[in-house]
Each structure stands twice: as C-alpha cells, then as structure tokens.
Image: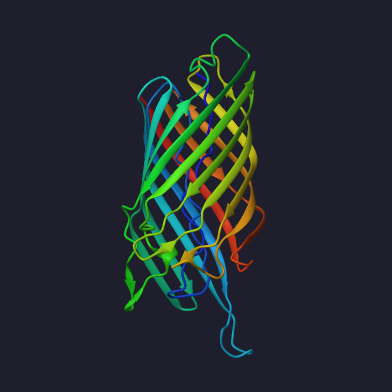
Amino acid sequence: MIVFRYIAFLLITFPLSVNSCDICGCSMGTSAALLPQLNNSVLGLRYNTSFFTSIHPSHGTADAPIKKSRDEFHSIELVGRYNLSPRFHLTALLPYKISSQQEGETVFHNSGVGDLILLGQFLTFHPNYCSGRKDKHQLRLGAGIKFPTGSFEKMREGRLLHAHLQNGTGSLDLLFSGIYTLRVAAWGFNTEVAYRLNNPNINRYRYGNRTRVSTTAFYWWNNNNNKLSLLPTAGLVLEHAQPNKEILKTIPYTGGWGLYASTGLDILVKNVVLGVHVYPSVIEKWGSSLVKRNFMGEVTVVAAF
C-alpha cells in the first residue's frame, strides 16, 4: 500500500492578549489530517513541542530593563480517522496541553484538555488512484469545526491568565483545507493549503484568521515483502496570522508570518506508523519581530485497522 504523510492545519493561534504580559510565544499547532493508509481507519497519539523566546517592550522610563520570557508548549493528542466510505474520511483530534512561561525567577505552569477538532475530508479523484499506474495523484478537500472544549478563563493571581497559556480559545472556529499529492514511481510531491476562520469568544476576544501553505517532497521505500516502509520527507511551510482583536480593537504585537523548513521520517511496520518531524525556522516575523521560535517538533504513533 502506498502511504503519504499529509501536512494540514495549523490549529493553535499565535500571540495573544495583554492581561499579564505584552507579548509571548504560542503553540504553533497541530495537524488534523493524519498520515496515511487511506484505505484504513487509524488511531494513535501525537506529541508536539515548541519553544519560544519573547522580548517584552518597556512602557516605563527609557532606561527600564528589557524583560524576556521563555515559553514552552507541549501537547499530547489523541488522534483518529474513521473511513465512512472509500471517498469520505472523518478525522478527530483531542489534545491535552501543557504550557509554561519563565520570566526571570518566576515560572508558571498550566495544563488541561484543549479544543476538540472534527474534520471531514472528501477524496475527489478515484479512491483507487494507486492501482495499475506508475503515475498516481489525488486531491482531497476538507472542512471542519474546532469546538471550545478547553478552558479559556483560568485565573492567575486574581487576573485572567494570558490567552496563549489558556488550554482553549473559547470560540467555535471553521477549518478548510485542500491537499494535492502526486507520485511518480517511488518519488512524490505533496502540496497543501489550509485556512482557519476564527470567531469571537464570549469575552469578545477574536484570534486572527490563519493561513498555511506547505509543499513537501517524499521518497517511498519498502522491502520486498512490504512489511517495512520508509518515507523520508523534506519541504517548506509558509504560515500567516492576522492580528488578534478584542472588542474590535487590534491587539498590539499579535499576528505575523513565518517560513519554515520541514524534514522528517515516517517508518511503517505492517499496520503501525511512527513519524518524527522537525521544523527549523528560515525567516519569520511574529509579534513585530519580538517573538522567536527556537524549536518545533512532533512524534506520532498510529495504528491502522
């Protein structure tokens, strides 16, 4: 069976409110379109991690010291896809989020269940696109909803916790994606466009809409008995986020864009897939260039049934 790794939604929004600090990093999100095995349903876990350094501009005297913070985000996600038919797949993702922020000697931790995502994807080309041809391609179109299942009003020292440290956004958001994949012999090419339309939550806070465009090349190798397959991948990811708003007022130091490389390896042993991927920065401008992402990576284990 031919296997592809689909890169899809960046689902967690970028910098945020000013309740406790002016500017901070954020979780750079997850993919709701799961790896592979298009003819099978899958169930598994995915671990994401991101590290940021943020500079907090001074609003006092000119000689006030510049403050910096280190933000860490970890997410353990239950992921699954159920094939309702050969052409229509339903994907679900439920994260458990762990975040921390260190500013000087002060460290804050938060954890809890995040927002549930449901995504339907339709295979527009014939489902048996792999059979009997050396050149194989497909187009998948998807739409979904992010539900506000995570808490978004946690307090810290009597004040509302900074938005990026909350477990959820409190808003019901819409997701759209298109994924095109071409394979010629053992080589393949994948391109994906994803868009997230965010709505205001009950506090009238609205995260900026997000766009992600990615292009990935891969090579599919398998041994003669098809029990082991390797898929090394390499590509580029472009992300853009509009500024966040609160009661229609734009929040400073939010939004921006970034270009990232992507590299990784998926290992398939029978019906089990192990994927390891990292995303080093090429160029980025988040939060008026005051936020730098130092590292992002993910590890995924899923089983097909």
In the rendering, at what x and y percent does residue 206 appear?
Answer: 44, 60
Front residue of 205 and 93: 205
**What is the x, y in percent for residue 190?**
60, 32
Nearer to the camera, 286 or 70: 286
The quadrant of the rendering that contains the C terminus is top left
Q: Is residue 177 above or below residue 162?
A: above
Q: Residue at 47%, 46% (x, y): give it.
A: 30
Q: How many marks?
A: 0
Q: Nearer the viewer, residue 5 or 128?
A: 128
| 234 vs 99: above or below | above
**Is residue 113 rendered to the left or right of residue 52?**
left
Horizontal side, residue 204 vs residue 59: left or right? left
The answer to whether residue 34 is visible is: no
Q: Residue at x 54, y 34 (%)?
A: 178
Residue located farthest toward the front when viewing the structure as drawn: 248
Residue at 43% from the left image edge and 74% from the top image edge: 19
